[in-house]
Amino acid sequence: MTKVLAITNQKGGVGKTTTAVNLSTSIALHKRKTLLIDIDPQGNTSTGIGLDKSKVKRCIYDVLINQTPIKEIILPTQVKYLDILPSTIQLAGAEIELVNYISRESAHWGGVEIGINGYVTPDFNTNWGYEYDYLNLRYEKSIQVNLNIYEQNIPLNKDKNMGLVTGIGMAWNNWRFSQPTYLAPDSSELKGFYMRDVSVRKTKLTAMYITVPLMYEIQTKNPRRIKRFHFGIGVLMSARVRTHTKIYFNEANKEYYLEDPADQSGDTFYGPYITPNTTYRNIQKDFNSFDLQPFRFDGMIRIGYGIVNLWGHFGLNQMFKKDRGPELYTWAAGITQLRKK
């Protein structure tokens, strides 16, 4: 039967190293196979047994952090029946890295995310009819930002490398229109126009959501977070908090007209209207639901290696309320700056 003897003391200079070296040597001299384990970053036990630390390529650090098998690290000593598991100064950094090992159940949802977003028809295209052409987007300017504030992990196995993930966060969708689009805030259904005879810098629809994920994630078992591959799939539930349009005019106090894109003759205009003055920085905001669904459900997928995390969402329910706008489904994709553990 194998016996384990541990010689420990928080105080220095009390003879721990001397005792360990002499005791292990004495046992080996009685022809008992003995393994001396040095777990002090100073490595004095390794030196005291006659080992040249400059020639040690791997040590107990590799066992703890890199999961190297102990048999590959053990070295023989000058004393018959006595082997040693050596230590070097590398072990000094193990304590910090072992924090990630203890927190292996940490998943890859919490953090700050940024990506592009848009919407498609049920046929996965962007041809939604000329009457809705005002919804065309500049995708490079259509940015989604997610702030995943709180993450809760529920491990499903002993190794804690697979489990369920939930939490709470916030999301901001910005759909930047490619045309000088004006969305009517007081319409009984989604209604958009083109602004004519005026210079418009940008116009967009913005929505803010509170988000709650439910995701299954699996990770590889490497104890070092930066060396783990991870994959997750699940559903993201969102509740809309606020919605508004933002129009940034280049000209203040300028008359302009609204053109109805549903009239292909180009003869239907409304107005005139006046742009805001410089007091409001030529910006006009209209707060309204614009017939967006109050709740949104997205399928989501996440994949990455280490702290690099790519994510994608696709709407499972329609973007607009039924019969109040075109049948469109949102999508978004981007990269995560993961929260440090």
Image (tube, helix red, strand yellow):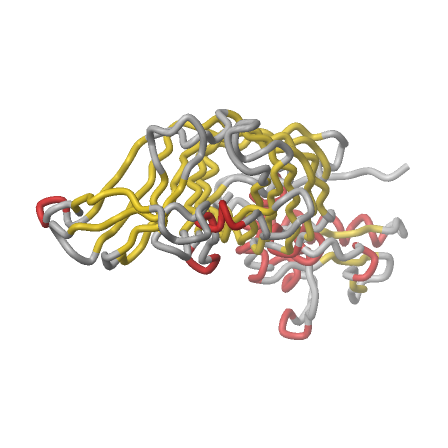
Q: Is 131 drawn above or below residue 156 in the view shown?
A: below
Q: Is 180 drawn above or below residue 297 in the view shown?
A: below
Tell whether 307 sits left or right of 270. right
* Residue 16 visible here: no
* Residue 291 visible here: yes
- The residue located at (69%, 61%) in the rendering is 59
Task: Find residue 341 and report its horizontal and vertical position in percent.
Answer: 51, 43
Q: Is 177 drawn above or below residue 189 in the view shown?
A: below
Q: Quadrant of residue 188?
A: top left
- The residue located at (10%, 50%) in the rendering is 278
Which sits in the foreground, 28 or 253?
A: 253
Task: Find residue 312 and report its horizontal and vertical position in percent.
Answer: 61, 47
Which sits in the foreground, 74 or 193?
A: 193
Task: Find residue 168 and report its horizontal and vertical position in percent.
Answer: 50, 29
Number of marks drawn: 0
Q: Quadrant of residue 182?
A: top left
- The residue located at (79%, 60%) in the rendering is 74
Q: Is 137 drawn above or below residue 112 in the view shown?
A: below
- The residue located at (67%, 35%) in the rendering is 234
Which sits in the foreground, 255 or 310?
A: 255
